[in-house]
Image: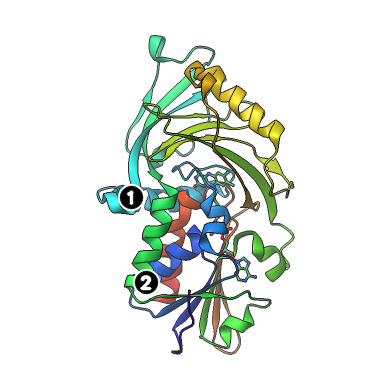
């Protein structure tokens, strides 16, 4: 990371997936962009995510459907380039009810309902879809490389007030995730704790999502192993891994996949999802002619919504 002497058109605050993708979209529209971040990109919530395209803990549904659709198409395109760390992945989602609420299904090109022998035992319904998955270590590095290649500077800087950015540029985009709670005094933002494990070198033929129980259970194959989750603990801000959570996550995964009984995690990580009753994507015009766009509160769907939200920001700021 370094400083930049020139005055940029826009400052993007935040270097999680939302900030990085927003910066890239703005740069692609010809704007000069600087990214400011308190944390190293590898220490953000985004660096912990399972990063499958799947709308979870994000509202409102109509806007999330539109942002999710744009993001799906962009990630599908990126999946053609292995260097991007994005690939299309078959995923099975199982349900405890006959008529699951598949409100997001219109955004994926093909959805197959599983019946008879194809239906996993113990469930009332299941679907199979092909969705993008971001291999986080590769994809975040790809985003950082793209930005650097296109001349976007990353500056390590904590902001106490958004006007700090507006003293350097006329436009600022606030992509601070949970940090917006203090920065905007936004008491609607809440942390939803997520713990995930990595089982190194373990693979499954497809990803698996079971959100029918008390806790979400998901298994996402990645190039470096299997990412297994999880928890969704509202208001819990503990960043250290919890041994009981680890045991429960493993137990639930092994119930559906007994072959995992001898596999132990080599990495356990925790992230705090920035949850809000609605994602805040809003452009505020200030009296002095400057503008701030808020782009935060993506809950459990940052990777699922990032490109759709970023395109909307770019349409406001880059015209
Ligand atoms: C366990 C887990 C699994 C997940 N799985 C998925 C999934 O499969 N699919 C999916 O779509 N989503 C998933 N998510 C959700 C996703 O990770 C989040 O929605 C996303 O990371 C939010 O990104 P963000 O850029 O808004 O925030 P963050 O990644 O938290 O980044 C915030 C940035 O803002 C900066 N910042 C904050 N405050 C300040 C300040 N005052 N000054 C300067 N900089 C500041 C930080 O340093 C950081 O750079 C998961 C999350 C968790 C925890």
Viewer-proximal residue, 241 or 298? 241
The answer to whether the beta carbon of the residue marked 2 is less than 8 Å from any atom of ligand 1 is: no
Count of residue discs: 2
- Quadrant position of residue 164: bottom right
Residue beneath the point at 40% across and 64% down: 144
Left or right: 231, with 116 as reference point: right
Q: Determine whether the residue tagged by mark 1 lies in a helix, strand or loop.
A: helix
Residue 46 can be seen, yes or no? yes
Q: Which SS class for mark 2?
A: helix
In primary-sequence order, the first of circles 1 and 2 is 1
User: Dot 1, crowdedness within 10 Å: few (<14), some or many (≥20)?
Assistant: some
x and y percentages locating residue 6 in the rendered image: 43, 89
Q: Which residue is mark 1?
A: 73
The answer to whether 195 is drawn above or below residue 249 in the figure is below
Tell me the number on the disc at residue 148.
2
| Res. 77 visible in picture | no
Q: Quadrant of ligand 1?
A: bottom right
Q: Does 59 appear above or below 242?
A: below
The answer to which of 55 and 219 lies nearer the viewer is 219
Q: Going by the image, does 215 lie left or right of 173?
A: right
Task: Give coordinates of residue 162: x percent, y percent.
Answer: 63, 77
Mark 2, Cα crowd under 10 Å, few <14 / some 14-19 / many 20+, is some
| Label 1 within 8 A of ligand 1 by Cβ | no
Q: Residue at x 43, y 57 (%)?
A: 140
- Image quadrant containing the C terminus: bottom left
Return the x and y of residue 257 as percentages of the image width and height: 49, 19
Q: For the residues carrying marks 1 and 2, which lies nearer the camera in this image? A: 2
Q: Which mark is residue 209?
A: none
Task: Tell me if label 1 and label 2 are in contact, CB under 8 Å.
Answer: no
């Amino acid at each position: 990371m370094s400083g930049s002497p020139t005055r940029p058109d826009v400052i993007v605050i935040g270097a999680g997936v939302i900030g990085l993708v927003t910066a890239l979209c703005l740069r692609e529209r010809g704007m000069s962009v600087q990214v400011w971040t308190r944390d190293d990109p590898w220490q953000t919530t985004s660096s912990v995510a399972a990063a499958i395209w799947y709308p979870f803990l994000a509202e409102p549904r109509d806007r999330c459907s539109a942002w999710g659709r744009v993001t799906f198409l962009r990630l599908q395109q990126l999946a053609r380039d292995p260097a991007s760390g994005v690939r299309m992945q078959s995923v099975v989602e199982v349900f405890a009810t006959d008529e699951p609420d598949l409100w997001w299904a219109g955004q994926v090109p093909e959805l197959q309902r599983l019946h008879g022998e194809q239906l996993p035992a113990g469930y009332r319904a299941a679907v199979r879809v092909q969705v993008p998955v971001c291999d986080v270590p590769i994809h975040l590095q790809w985003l950082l490389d793209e930005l650097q290649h296109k001349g976007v500077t990353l500056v390590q800087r904590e902001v106490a007030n958004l006007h700090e950015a507006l003293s350097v540029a006329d436009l600022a985009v606030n992509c601070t995730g949970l940090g917006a709670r203090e920065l905007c005094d936004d008491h609607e933002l809440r942390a939803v704790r997520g713990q995930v494990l990595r089982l190194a070198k373990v693979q499954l033929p497809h990803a698996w999502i079971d959100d029918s129980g008390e806790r979400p259970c998901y298994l996402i194959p990645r190039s470096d192993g299997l990412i297994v989750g999880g928890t969704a603990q509202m208001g819990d801000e503990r960043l250290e891994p919890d041994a009981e959570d680890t045991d429960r996550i493993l137990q639930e995964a092994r119930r559906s996949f007994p072959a995992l009984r001898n596999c132990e995690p080599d990495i356990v990580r925790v992230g705090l999802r920035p949850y809000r009753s609605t994602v805040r994507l809003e452009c505020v015009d200030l009296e002095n002619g400057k503008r701030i766009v808020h782009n935060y509160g993506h809950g459990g769907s940052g990777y699922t919504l990032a490109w759709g939200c970023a395109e909307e920001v770019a349409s406001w700021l880059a015209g």
